[in-house]
Amino acid sequence: MIAAIGLVLGIVAGIFLEPTVPTWLQPYLPIAVVAALDAVFGGLRALLDGIFDDRVFVVSFVANVLVAALIVYLGDQLGVGSQLSTGVVVVLGIRIFSNAAAIRRQLFRA
Amino acid sequence: MLLLRNLVEDSLDEGYARAAARRAAGEPARKSAVVVLTVGLLLVGLLLATAFAQTRQRASSAATARDALVAEVEQRTAANDRAQARLDQQRAAVQRAQRQVLALSGAGTELADQLSRLEASTGAGPVTGPGMVVRLDDAPGNSDGSDVDPRTDVDNSGRVTDRDLQTVVNEVWAAGAEAVSVNGQRLTALSAIRAAGDAVLVDFRPLTPPYTIEAVGDPHKLRETFVGGFGGSYLQVLQGYGITYGVEDRDRLKLAASAGVRLRYAAEPQPSETRSNGT
């Protein structure tokens, strides 16, 4: 419950404070969002499976975001940035979809 | 295939299963759990909201910039039109004053006649007289250019190009026209019909179709010579591409003066120079 307040607080802070993202960080924001969504859906599924663990969730979220950004950064330095971002989005997208499907099966038994 | 199956089947982070196994093995729960989770979710919310705000801000700033540019273009165009109107007015006033001064003496009257003849033939002054009108228009159904994707190579052959106008105007001159204007832009010896993007420019002023070429000349011969010559057959070729045209005689045409005949480098030769050239 308290944790949900944290989520709401974060959203409210982001919308109303409008933190300015430095220009060098801007290319990694979209990929970070996809990575964060992956972690969130993974956490939700674990919650429904009854095996949720807060530490695993937070660590997987932070690591996902950092690794995704790092991959894109490396790709940018090597000239394959857009291809690597596409790869990251595809992999994370598939994971999000299958996690969402598992959540759906849990919730609706269908 | 193995990679895809791995992706789909092991979509849940392994860490959850291991943590559950550890818990089942009797490891005690940590006290900081709620704090860690709250901070984590706060980060998630912050990230999502920041991305949202960022995207919205970028889109709106692009739209604002575009609107500002459009407004500036309109403003400048209006200012340009106003300046042109004032210029025309003052030029007319200068002309009137000139006539008045010249009319004071006999030699001046002669000079004034010569001046108006020269102005009429160079395009610096307005002319009236009989002549003909040639009307050209893009093929119907041709998009107006603003939404054409150049990469898809949409069929643009039904559009009147600067080359078409050049050819037609040249043929009008060749048919014996003494003064020609295109969409109200009087042509002088220094006029150019060009294209910039999809627009046809006459003396750097963009024109919009339909194009009206007015020519003053011998009312009987002008149209006959034009239609019977290369001009007429060229128009028929254009018609094959769907371009519509019309040629009519007019008893009386009034052509405006050119917006500006200005010599930047050429100057009248001094009397001594004329002699030394020996012609």
Image: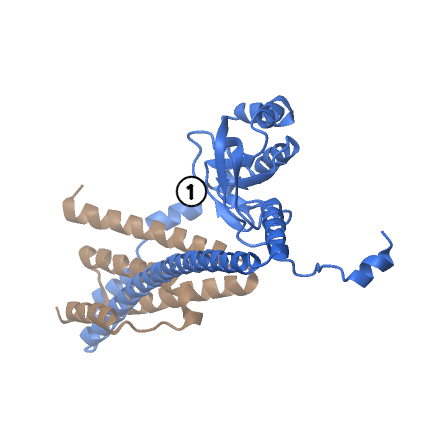
Chain colours: A brown, B blue
> In the figure, is residue A64 to the left or right of B242?
left
Residue B12 visible to the viewer: yes
Vertical position of residue B75 compared to residue B223: above or below: below
Q: Is residue B37 visible?
A: no
* Element carrying mark 1: loop
Q: Please name the residue that numbered disc 1 is placed on.
A: B147
Q: Which image quarter holds the C terminus of chain A?
A: top left
* Identity of the residue drawn at 44% across and 57% down: B89
Using a 10 Å C-alpha cutoff, classify the residue at mark 1 as few (fewer than 14 neighbours), some (14 to 19) or many (20 or more).
few
Front position in the image: B63 or B251: B251
Q: Where is residue B79? Give x, y as percent.
A: 41, 60
Q: Amino acid at mark 1?
A: Asp
The chain to which mark 1 is attached is: B
Q: Position of residue B86 (x, y in %)?
A: 43, 59
From the top left corner, tell me how far across and down residue B193 is, in percent: 59, 44
* Number of residue marks: 1
Q: In which quadrant is the N terminus of chain A drawn?
A: bottom left
Asked where in the image residue B187 lies, by quadrant, the reply is top right
Residue that sits furthest to the left in the current view: A1
Q: Residue furthest bottom?
A: B31
How far from the left and from the top, in percent, is residue A107?
Answer: 15, 49
Horizontal arrangement in the rendering, residue A57 relative to residue B201 (left or right):
left
Residue B242, relative to residue A89: is it above or below?
A: above
Q: Is residue B228 left or right of residue A98?
A: right
Q: Residue furthest front?
A: B106
Residue closer to the observer: B224 or A38: B224
In percent of the image, x 49 and y 54: which residue is there? Answer: A83
Q: Nearer the viewer, residue B28 or B33?
A: B33
